[in-house]
Amino acid sequence: MRKNLKNIAAQLSEDDIQELIRIKKTGDKRLMSLRKKREKLAAQLEALDAEIAVVAGAAPAAKSRRGRKPAAPGKKKRGTRVNLSGAVRDVMAKSGEPMRARDIVDGLPDAGIKVRDVAAMRKRVSVVLASQTNHFEQVERGVYRLRD
């Protein structure tokens, strides 16, 4: 790579080198100019947001941020998450008898867990059953019960 650069540099005249330096400086200046313009526009946008908040009667936002928007006033936030292991224990406790992963998945909506992909959830439940031996014990292949 260095040999190629040296060969190319040897072929360039002094005028060519000066032209390349000028182009680089121009690009750097343009970049700096665009960054300053972006900062100025961001400041204007924040000022407009504050003015909108005042007109709308809400307190101005501290500073704009990226990512999820905060919940609108008066709207409910998402419910608390349910622990999968706890939900599996709840389903098995209600049943009172040893169960297979597919039967547990069928009972998860009653325990507060939405099941969108049944196959993926069955795998997750199987992992919970097999890995948490302090809560579950295997009765036979694929069948588990709550540990006493």
Image: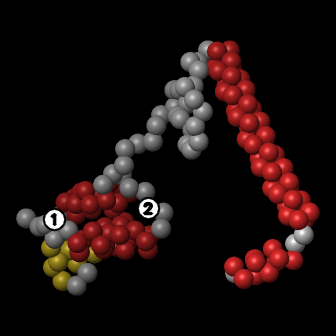
Name the residue that disc number 1 marks: 135
What amino acid is found at the position of numbered circle 2 in the picture? Val
Residue drawn at x 51%, y 26% as measured from the top left: 74
**As drawn, is 145 to the left or to the right of 31?**
left
Residue drawn at x 77%, y 36% as measured from the top left: 37
User: Percent position (x, y) of residue 108?
Assistant: 35, 60
As measured in the structure, the alpha-carbon distance from the residue carrying label 1 to the one carrying label 2 is 22 Å
Residue drawn at x 25%, y 81% as measured from the top left: 142
Q: Residues within 10 Å of mark 1 (few under 14, many from 20)?
A: some
The quarter holding residue 47 reads top right
Q: Nearer the viewer, residue 5 or 116?
A: 5
Q: Disc 1 on helix, strand or loop?
A: loop
Q: Is any atom of residue 147 visible in this view?
A: yes
Q: Residue furthest bottom?
A: 141
Image quarter where the C terminus lies is bottom left
Name the residue that disc number 2 marks: 115
Residue drawn at x 44%, y 74% as measured from the top left: 119
Q: Disc 2 on helix, strand or loop?
A: loop
What amino acid is found at the position of numbered circle 1 in the picture? His
User: Percent position (x, y) of residue 99?
Assistant: 24, 72
User: Percent position (x, y) of residue 123?
Assistant: 37, 74
